[in-house]
Amino acid sequence: MKAGSNLERILTEGKFAATAELGPPKSADAEAIRKKAAILKGKVDAVNITDNQTAIVRMSSIGAAKLTLDTGLEPIMQMVCRDRNRIAMQSDILGAAALGLKNMLCLTGDHQKAGNHPTAKNVFDIDSLQLLQIVKNMRDNKVFQNGEEIRNTKKAPIVEPKMFLGAAENPFAHPYEFRAIRLAKKMKAGADFIQTQCIFDIPRFKEWMKEVVDRGTHEKLFILAGVMPIKSPRVIEYMKNNVPGMSIPDELVKRMKGASDPKEEGVNFVVELINEVRQIEGIRGVHIMAVEWEEIVPSIVERAGLLPRP
């Protein structure tokens, strides 16, 4: 065990993992975190605490993760490269570890032009691959990015941050032929687990996973398939036409448009999808991205046969 987190234990023991997202509020409302955690506790193994997702200012990932941890639900702290340089990132990683956080997801981050401060100055001192390398070195080699040992004085003990490291990967972004290669690079950089972009195009996802398995990457990396419940035909149409890196079949759009209860149909689709991805070689869990619809997650995991959690 590298960090001793619950998520690491479940994956290491060969059990099928289930994670979800817990989006921090756009305020200092701690109770909003506690209410979402109460919905998700016992239903999933850990929850991603997003880091100013879509470049919109929210409660910090570290602060929200500590509040989540205090409820008894394990957080996965996300960190994006958009807002901090390597000094601030390493400082925050030390602070997060000191607060008891044991999972971390390394992301490059959405461009600030997509958010509510489009004129903000971005940082991007490093990218997600470099961030993985830095945290892996801090954990395994007990040194900062500059090579200095992680200790207060020359005679003080080394106290390194122990994090179970994750990253994201999108099997549907062009050029397709580099996606499995990019996944292997993230594994080599230090990723212990991967959460994929949400899946709507299952044939394309299977092709990508075959490439991953052919390379043997799945034997060294825990891969969690990303799924997203859709509430309405309008949402799926918007994503199909406006969100880069998505692959959404026309048949799914027609299915949602023809549904008498679109919300129920969106849940039906996700449950079917979970059952299908569980059969794919190399898939070790599922990551449910409900995006401000946390209350639907318990129903999804129950209908998918993922309860009780180990």
Image (tube, rainbow, N blue to C red):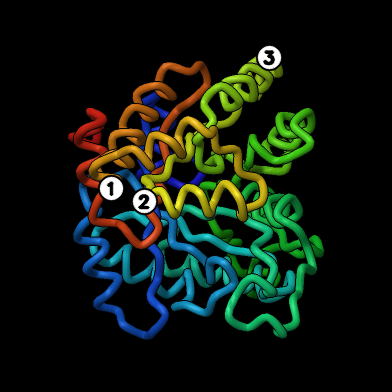
Residue mark closest to the camera, 1 vs 3: 1
The tag earlier along the polypeptide, 3 or 2, is: 3
The image shows residue 281 at horizontal and vertical percentages of: 51, 16
Residue mark closest to the camera, 3 vs 2: 2
Residue at 57 percent across and 27 percent down: it is: 205
Q: Which residue is mark 3?
A: 214
* Callout 3 amino acid: Asp
Q: Which residue is mark 2?
A: 232
Residue at 65 percent across and 55 percent down: it is: 135
Foreground of the two, 155 or 174: 174
The tag earlier along the polypeptide, 1 or 2, is: 2
* Callout 2 amino acid: Ser
The image shows residue 141 at horizontal and vertical percentages of: 69, 50
The C terminus is located in which quarter?
Answer: top left
The tag earlier along the polypeptide, 1 or 3, is: 3
- The disc at residue 107 is none
Helix or strand or loop: what does disc 2 sit on?
Answer: loop
Asked if residue 92 lies left or right of residue 63, the reply is right
Question: Crowding at label 3, few (<14), some or many (≥20) Cα neighbours within 10 Å?
Answer: few
Tell me if label 1 and label 3 are in contact, CB under 8 Å. no
The image shows residue 262 at horizontal and vertical percentages of: 30, 45
* Callout 1 amino acid: Lys
Residue at 47 percent across and 77 percent down: it is: 58
- In the image as oriented, which residue stretches furthest toward the front? 258
